Structures are given as C-alpha cells and as structure tokens.
Amino acid sequence: MADISHLELHIPTLVMLGILSGAISTFAYLPYIIDTIRGNTRPQRASWLIWSILGAIAFSSQAYEGAGNSLLFTSVQVSGTIIVLLLSISAGGGALLRRSDCLVLCIAALGLLAWYHTDDASYALAFTIGISLLGATTTIARAYRDPDSETLSTWSCSFIASIFAIASIGELNWVILAYPLYLLTLNGAIVAAIMLGRLRSMDRTTAFAQGAASI
C-alpha cells in the first residue's frame, strides 16, 4: 500500500513538472517573437532552419521512445522554433541555407535512415543533437559579439524550462533525457555568451570614458 501511495504522489508531481516546463517555454518565446517583429532581434536564418528540422526529428524520436511528461516541453520548443524561423525569413539575418547547412541536413537524413533500418530512434536523436550543437555555434558566437541582437529573457526562461523538463521524466532513460539535456546546454551557453558579451561592452565603455576623462 505504501508503494502505491508513493506512486500516486509521484506521478502528479511529474505531470506538473512537465506542464510547468511547457508553460515556461511558451512564455520564453513570446518576447523573442515580439522583439523579432519589432526589429530588435535578428534571428540567424540558417540556425533556426536547422533547429526547426532537427527539433521535429527529436520530437518524433522522443514520442517513438515513449516520452510522456517532457513531450509537452519538446513540442512547445519545436513550435516556437518554427514560428521564429518563419519570422526570420523577412526579419532575420544571414543566408537561409548555406552549403554547410545542406551537409548538416544530409547527416540528419542519415540518422533517419539508420532509425528506419534499425528500428532504434537513438540513432536519429544522436545525429540530431550532434549536428545541432555544431549549428548553434553561429548563434553563440554572435550573441557574444553582439549581445543586444539576442533576447536574454527567452534563453534564460528556456534554460529554466529545460531543468523542469528533465525533472519531469522521472527515470534514467538517456534517449528521452538527451534532448532536454541538449537544450539545457545550448540555452546555458547562449545565456553565458550574452552575459559575457555585455560585460565586454561595459568594460569597453568604461575604458573609453576613462580615456576621455584623462584627456
């Protein structure tokens, strides 16, 4: 009886964590979408194209492997990514599809073929996460060089949502854990890049002001 009572308390908690991760993810994308429409944020078209396609693959592989509570988080992430991609066509920066991006998508296709022939979604997920990290370097570098080009609140909230998504899984299943862990790493890296970029800008401004004052 004690074990059944524990389960009854445990399962609602995991469900709530999953709902919370999805709600925070939804909130996270709103300021980014608004800033993009206003022209304050310029999404890198290539990065968001890759994230949209690979996020859809990750969602499919997670659903195939039986992800439950964390699937809401993934679905919101993918939906938000696609919306930003569509906005970036007219309000973003950079090319939509470069030669290197074609290579990335071909590698993703290999992951799908491996999934099809082995009936194991972990291949597609591994390929997806690996090349997504490579594609993210452009956004991370730009966030450091030009921190005002990115919306800090979006990446911060997405980082927090990733933590709740990981907690909502409730088991050590690396296939299901992989995508939330990847997004935790990605969002954390972009937040760090923005903060470091802002500190660098402040140091330059301070140095300039001190130099001007000494003249």
Image (cartoon, rainbow, N blue to C red):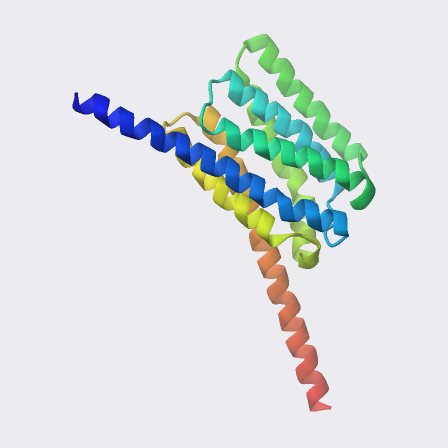
Q: Name the residue located 53 percent from the left edge and 36 percent from the top edge.
A: 182
Residue 69, quarter of picture: top left
Identify whether 139 is placed above or below 80: below
- The reply, left or right, for residue 48 in relation to residue 189 is right
Question: Can you give x and y, in whole percent of width and height, for residue 129 in the image?
Answer: 58, 31
**Vertical placement of residue 163 versus 152, above or below:** above
Q: Is residue 176 left or right of residue 89?
A: left
Query: Which residue occupies the extreme left position in the image?
Result: 1
Q: Position of residue 47 (x, y in %)?
A: 71, 39
The outermost residue toward the bottom is 215
Viewed as shown, does residue 160 lie left or right of 155? left
Please state which of residues 166 and 84 is positioned toward the viewer in this rendering. Answer: 84
Residue at the (28%, 25%) spot, across then down: 8
Q: Residue, x 54% and y 10% (percent of image)?
A: 119
Q: Nearer the viewer, residue 89 or 93?
A: 89
Q: Is residue 41 left or right of residue 202?
A: right
Q: Is residue 4 visible?
A: yes
- Residue drawn at the location 58% of the way across and 47% of the way down: 155
Q: How many marks?
A: 0
Q: Quadrant of the C terminus?
A: bottom right
Residue 3 is situated, as x and y percent measured from the top left of the image, at 20, 23
Q: Position of residue 55 (x, y in %)?
A: 62, 29
**Residue 122 visible in the shown view:** no
Residue 7 quadrant: top left
**Quadrant where the N terminus is found in the figure:** top left
